[in-house]
Amino acid sequence: MNIIYERTAVRRYHEVHVYRLLHKWDFSPKVPRKKFINTASKEEKEEQFKKRWRK
């Protein structure tokens, strides 16, 4: 389904204009949430963020 073509009958738009159209039609970008370090368990923090000493 190509919603832009269905609504405007135009096949090619510049990507910036596509963003503007979708925003105008009340679409919003969906992005994954950031995973914060405070949500990790103590064991995960110690394993992934431990200091590594140089020899």
Image: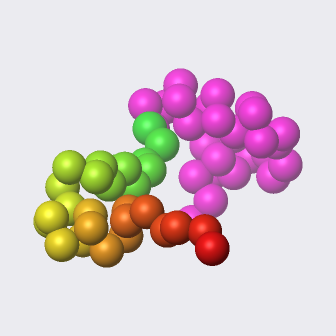
Quarter assignment of residue 27: top left
In the image, 54 versus 2, the foreground residue is 54
- Asked whether residue 19 is drawn in magenta, I would say yes
The total number of labels drawn is: 0
User: Which residue occupies 56% across, 36% down?
Assistant: 22
- Asked whether residue 26 is drawn in magenta, I would say yes
Vertical placement of residue 50 versus 18, above or below:
below
User: Which residue occupies 64% across, 28% down?
Assistant: 20
Q: Where in the figure is residue 11, as x and y percent of width and height?
A: 81, 52
User: Which residue occupies 84% across, 39% down?
Assistant: 14
- The segment highlighted magenta reads 1-27
In the image, 12 versus 36, the foreground residue is 36
Q: Where in the figure is residue 3, as x and y percent of width and height?
A: 58, 52
User: Which residue occupies 62% across, 59% down?
Assistant: 2
Can you name the residue that lies furthest to the front here? 55
Going by the image, does 48 lie left or right of 6?
A: left
Quarter holding the C terminus is: bottom right
**Colouring used for the render:** rainbow
Vertical placement of residue 33 versus 47, above or below:
above
Quarter holding the N terminus is: bottom right
Q: Where in the figure is residue 43, as x and y percent of width and height?
A: 18, 72
